[in-house]
Image: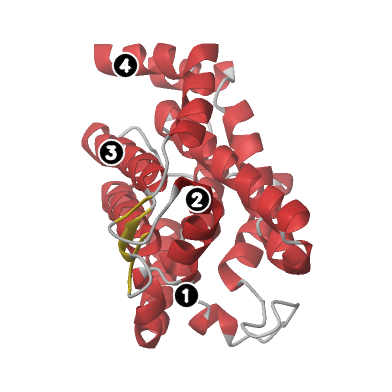
Amino acid sequence: MNDAYERWERITGRWWFFVLMCLFSFIVPPYAFKGFEWAQTGDLIAHILQHSLMTGWSAAYPFFQIVAVLFILGVVFLRQRFSKIFSIYVAFSYLFFAVGQNISLTEVYGTAVLIVNIVMFSFVAAFWFWEAFLGYNNFSAAPRSPWRYWVVLPAALAFWYPINGDTFGPDFKLLYFLTSGSALTFCMMTPVFLAVLFLYYPRVNLVTLRVTALVGLVIGFYNLLSNFVFEPALWWNGVLHLPLLILSIYGFTLSFSKQNKEFLQA
């Protein structure tokens, strides 16, 4: 392991790093160029997410869904030869999420920005770019134990995102694998990216796994609170965010295993 990796492994493993990430998500407010007062913070956040830039890209959703599947298949069939390419794809995906999901352009607020998400998603992207440089993720051999594949189910559910856009209730059309737009969202693709790392653990970048899972845990918690507590009518959307929370908790816990350190030191 190089010195920078060991340094970041120590930093991200400290209790205060976790607390700092959580506090950052609380204290950084959204911003709008017009018509915004602090008392409207909750409304502004909802407005940005509902009218984000990506909502105008629906015609391109099938393209991005297919691209995501092709990159996953690249890992499966090309294995280690595809590792760096996959990491670069994931890094750019998080930058895409940062911009596409957290900026809106409307007459109500003008240009509105969810700053905390942009910073946190970009932070995750930086660690995936770093992994592309280091090349610590090793996809040379798939796991032999069948139980390791349990992560595929919640990841597939997140990618499918079977929800009716009008009622926000369950809608299990297979067509949504192609049209849901999940490939452009942090909450639905993070379980997919984490699942890939889980399948090849411990031969992965521990720091990248930990940072991705930690941000996923924070965002997942907020989504469940929003969908189950503040907007219970959106309960099914909350259910579809469970893969993010469950796999993020699993990934954050797994990132402290000694198996990973033994592999990287070998």
Q: Which residue is mark 4?
A: 1
Q: Which residue is mark 1?
A: 181
Lower position in the chain sequence, tag 1 or tag 2: 2
Q: How far is disc 1 from disc 2 in space, using C-alphas?
A: 26 Å
Viewer-side label of 2, 4: 2
Q: How far is disc 4 from disc 3 in space, using C-alphas?
A: 19 Å
Q: Is residue 192 visible?
A: no
Eyeballing the image, is 27 above or below 142?
Answer: above
Q: Is residue 115 visible?
A: yes
Q: Nearer the viewer, residue 242 or 203?
A: 242
**What's the residue at 53%, 29% (across, down)?**
22
Q: Are marks 4 and 3 in contact (CB under 8 Å)?
A: no
- Determine which of the numbered discs, if any, sits on residue 126 in the image: 3
Lower position in the chain sequence, tag 4 or tag 3: 4
Residue 100: image location, x then y, percent: 34, 64
Asked if residue 2 lies left or right of residue 225, the reply is left
Viewer-side label of 4, 3: 3
Lower position in the chain sequence, tag 2 or tag 3: 2
Q: Nearer the viewer, residue 60 or 48?
A: 48
For mark 4, give the secondary structure: loop
**What's the residue at 56%, 38% (across, down)?**
218
Q: Which residue is mark 2?
A: 41
Amino acid, disc 1: Gly
Viewer-side label of 2, 3: 2
Lower position in the chain sequence, tag 2 or tag 4: 4
Amino acid, disc 4: Met
Viewer-side label of 4, 1: 1
Q: How far is disc 1 from disc 3 in space, using C-alphas?
A: 23 Å
Q: How far is disc 2 from disc 3 in space, using C-alphas?
A: 28 Å
Residue 162: image location, x then y, percent: 66, 76
Residue 207: image location, x then y, percent: 42, 27
Asked if residue 238 lies left or right of residue 60, the reply is right
